[in-house]
Amino acid sequence: DVKVTQSSRYLVKRTGEKVFLECVQDMDHENMFWYRQDPGLGLRLIYFSYDVKMKEKGDIPEGYSVSREKKERFSLILESASTNQTSMYLCASRNTGNTEAFFGQGTRLTVV
Amino acid sequence: DAKTTQPPSMDCAEGRAANLPCNHSTISGNEYVYWYRQIHSQGPQYIIHGLKNNETNEMASLIITEDRKSSTLILPHATLRDTAVYYCIVRVAGYGGSQGNLIFGKGTKLSVKP
């Protein structure tokens, strides 16, 4: 089975902290994605990567950056966490072509 | 990617078929229809996808109209564990870059009742 593993299920951080959310997939997928999910707004794409060291902005990249140094790992970085970044963060991976995406279990981040 | 329209919520009796509609009237010829679901507090889970032919797998059936402007996901015998938000997504079969991203709408909250 494909596994997409997010490093933390729950995280509490203080305003202004630098936050790293890690995601690892074990199926050699080229494409990896970071979403956030908020009540009433659904899933929104933050960033995605289609290859090592490649990244593209999604719909809401402001306040976030990403890193993909190795194919299996895609990190989401909050340079200076703010309370409006309190959310559920979901990582996904997918192979190139017409294939399904696999999601991690999510990280519920609270910024206080 | 084309936008989709789904009803915000639906109820279904346990053991009955759940039919979830989706409108995608601006779908392009090279866009597939995907269905995912998200059970509370979990990540979304892939269910099924198709281009123009009807598809069936162990989880569900997908019926796409001939003009491809709408589709229906069918759960043949809904159980309480099928209570979830169901997302209909259309996307290009991409080969990297910005093509092929999943753009999630708000989905349909399906409640299966005993």
Image: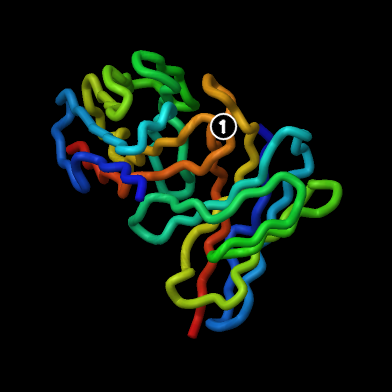
Q: Which residue ends up furthest to the top in the rendered image?
A: A53
The location of residue A44, given as percent across then percent down, is 46, 36
**Relative to residue A65, is residue B6 drawn left or right?**
right
The location of residue B68, given as percent across then percent down, is 79, 47
The location of residue A51, given as percent across then percent down, is 41, 19
Rendered view: B114 above or below A106: below
The residue located at (17%, 29%) in the rendering is A15
How many numbered badges does the structure rendering display? Answer: 1
The residue located at (43%, 72%) in the rendering is B81
**Which residue lies under the disc numbered 1?**
A97
Going by the numbered disc 1, the residue's amino acid type is: Gly
The residue located at (38%, 21%) in the rendering is A62
**Relative to residue A102, is residue B87 drawn left or right?**
right
The residue located at (15%, 35%) in the rendering is A13
Using the image as rendered, state which of residue A4 and residue A44 is in the foreground: A4
Q: How is the image coloured?
A: rainbow
Rendered view: A42 above or below B74: above
Which quarter of the image is occupied by the C terminus of chain A?
Answer: top left
Using the image as rendered, state which of residue B57 and residue A17 is in the foreground: B57
Rendered view: B71 above or below B91: below
Label 1 neighbour load within 10 Å: few <14, some 14-19, many 20+: some
The location of residue B40, given as percent across then percent down, is 38, 60
Q: Secondary structure at mark 1?
A: loop
Q: Which residue ends up furthest to the bottom in the rendered image?
A: B114
Rendered view: A103 above or below B97: below
Write down the chain letter for disc 1. Answer: A
